[in-house]
Image (spheres, grey):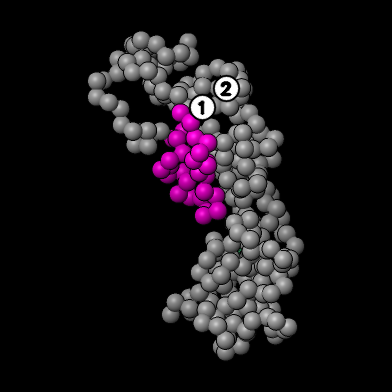
């Protein structure tokens, strides 16, 4: 039942090519998995169907990753592993608006904080949050210093060394340091004043005296500028994990 379903999904995604395995190509019908990568092309695989090996293409832009692996069952983004070491791709890119290939994650034409996820040629605009920028090399959101060509974050455009209010937060704010935003917290009992852009003694126009109850830890505040546990990421395909390298995280 499981393998039938697997075959149906692969068959819907790729197209079968009538061909017999040649040379050193492993015969999928002799393998327990019943599926094996093509030995020459990383975007092709052989599947045992009705006792016969059949050659399939991965969806355009994806490469063979192994049974039940990857973003479609069996195929994955090429940059997620060494799938194409010593192998070529048989199929050329099929581009659509914003998509270099039908499937993939691509940089935005005009913005460092946005990028496109493409699924069967349909592009969906995504946004890097929490001061992160899209990194073309890792295909994910990353700290600005790791992103070539996008060193400064637009948050800090007005003043590369100024403070910027963070949503409606009364105690957290962005501190720009040479164009890089850093998340900061006002000292206890002070609140961020969005007019003077400083931590001040409350009350301000927007913020009352803080309660004496300690604030919940940041990941529970539900602030949408903070990457952790953000429901927006639930819609991302598995390749677009927007988690910055932990050792670069600062307060
Ligand atoms: C991809 O889109 C085309 C039309 O744009 C459609 O015919 C095809 O069924 C779609 N394939 C998948 C796997 O969704």
Q: Circle 2 — which element? A: strand
In the image, is 143 to the left or to the right of 203?
A: right
Q: Position of residue 222 (x, y in %)?
A: 37, 36
In the image, is 208 to the left or to the right of 185?
A: left
Q: For residue 239, which numbered disc appears in the image?
A: none
Q: Position of residue 52 (x, y in %)?
A: 61, 88
Could you say which quadrant of the image residue 46 lies in? bottom right
Start-end of magenta stretch:
224-251
Q: Is residue 60 visible?
A: no
Task: Identify the residue at horizontal 69%, vertical 63% (top origin).
Answer: 85
Q: Is-magenta flag for residue 247?
A: yes
Q: Position of residue 230 (x, y in %)?
A: 43, 42
Q: Which residue is mark 2?
A: 177
- Find out if the beta carbon at label 2 lies less than 8 Å from the nearest ligand 1 atom: no
**Dividing the image into 4 quarters, which one contains the N terminus?**
bottom left
Q: CA distance from mark 1 to mark 2?
A: 7 Å
Could you say which quadrant of the image residue 39 lies in? bottom right
Q: Is-magenta flag for residue 94?
A: no
Task: Identify the residue at horizontal 69%, vertical 40% (top origin).
Answer: 109
Earlier-in-chain disc, 1 versus 2: 2
Identify the residue at the far bottom of this view: 51
Total number of numbered discs in the rendering: 2
Q: Is residue 132 visible?
A: yes
**Image height check: is 97 above or below 174?**
below
Q: Which residue is mark 1?
A: 182
Q: Circle 1 — which element? A: strand
Task: Identify the residue at horizontal 61%, vertical 40% (top origin).
Answer: 134
In the image, is 23 to the left or to the right of 52?
A: right
């Amino acid at each position: 039942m499981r393998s039938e379903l697997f075959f149906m999904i692969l068959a819907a995604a790729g197209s079968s090519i009538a061909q017999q395995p040649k040379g050193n190509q492993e015969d999928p019908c002799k393998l327990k998995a019943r599926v094996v990568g093509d030995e020459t092309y990383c975007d092709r695989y052989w599947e045992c169907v009705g006792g016969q090996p059949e050659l399939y293409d991965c969806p355009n832009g994806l490469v063979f990753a192994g049974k039940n692996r990857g973003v479609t069952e069996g195929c994955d983004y090429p940059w997620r592993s060494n799938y194409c070491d010593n192998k070529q791709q048989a199929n050329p890119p099929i581009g659509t608006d914003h998509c270099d290939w039908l499937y993939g994650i691509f940089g935005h034409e005009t913005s460092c904080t946005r990028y496109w996820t493409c699924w069967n040629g349909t592009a969906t605009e995504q946004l890097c949050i929490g001061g992160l920028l899209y990194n073309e090399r890792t295909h994910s959101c990353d700290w600005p210093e790791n992103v070539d060509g996008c060193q400064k974050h637009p948050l800090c455009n007005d003043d590369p060394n100024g403070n910027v209010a963070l949503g409606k937060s009364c105690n957290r704010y962005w501190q720009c340091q040479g164009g890089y935003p850093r998340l900061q917290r006002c000292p206890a009992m002070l609140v961020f004043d969005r007019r003077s852009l400083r931590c001040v003694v409350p009350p301000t126009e927007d913020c009352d005296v803080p309660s004496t109850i300690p604030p919940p830890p940041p990941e529970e505040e539900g602030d949408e500028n903070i990457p952790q546990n953000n429901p927006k990421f639930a819609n991302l395909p598995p390749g677009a994990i927007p988690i910055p390298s932990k050792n670069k995280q600062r307060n």
